[in-house]
Image (cartoon, rainbow, N blue to C red):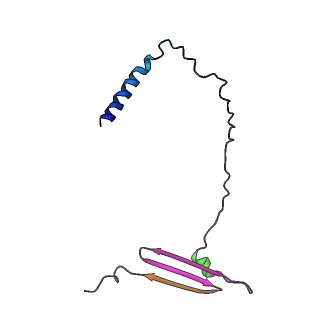
Amino acid sequence: MAFTKFLFMLSLITIASAGFVWQDDNFPGFPSDMWPSIQIPTIPPFDPKIPNFAFSFPSPDNIKKTKPQPGQTYSGVYVSSNGGKGTMVANINGEVIEKKFGEDSKKSKSKS
């Protein structure tokens, strides 16, 4: 603890007297040619061109109506949910499957 107080007092004395060392202000500093100057290249402005990938999802009606041509295969699936209820539409090679699922708020009450 005494050593810490000694270092603290020494640093205060050093800081306080540091301004009085060169009172004549004739400190020459570093010569200008001591360090080579570094030329940093400028970076050109960056303007990214992001392509617009427009993609539209097919509607459930489009999935239901799609019929593959002979020799083609098709599979489309649409799933939506809202508040615990949902709908699933699947078209696999022209065979359409539509299912509705979820709980109705009146039917979900527990029996006691």
Q: Does residue 24 appear to the left or right of 4 in the view shown?
A: right
The outermost residue toward the front is: 3
Q: Does residue 42 appear to the left or right of 11 in the view shown?
A: right
Between residue 73 and residue 23, name the one nearer to us: 23
- Picture layout, residue 46 above or below residue 21: below
Q: Does residue 66 appear to the left or right of 99 in the view shown?
A: right
Q: Quadrant for the C terminus, please.
A: bottom left
Q: Quadrant for the N terminus, please.
A: top left
The outermost residue toward the left is: 112
Q: Quadrant of residue 34?
A: top right
Picture coordinates of residue 23 (x, y %)?
47, 13
Picture coordinates of residue 90 (x, y %)?
58, 82
| Residue at (64, 86) in percent of width and height | 94
The outermost residue toward the right is: 71
- Picture layout, residue 53 above or below residue 98: above
| Residue at (61, 73) in percent of width and height | 58
Count the labels in the image.
0
| Residue at (56, 86) in percent of width and height | 97
Picture coordinates of residue 5 (x, y %)?
31, 32
In magenta stretch: residue 36:
no
Picture coordinates of residue 36 (x, y %)?
68, 30
Q: Does residue 32 appear to the left or right of 69 in the view shown?
A: left
Point out the stretch of residues depicted in magenta.
65-94
| Residue at (67, 36) in percent of width and height | 40
Q: Quadrant of residue 37?
A: top right
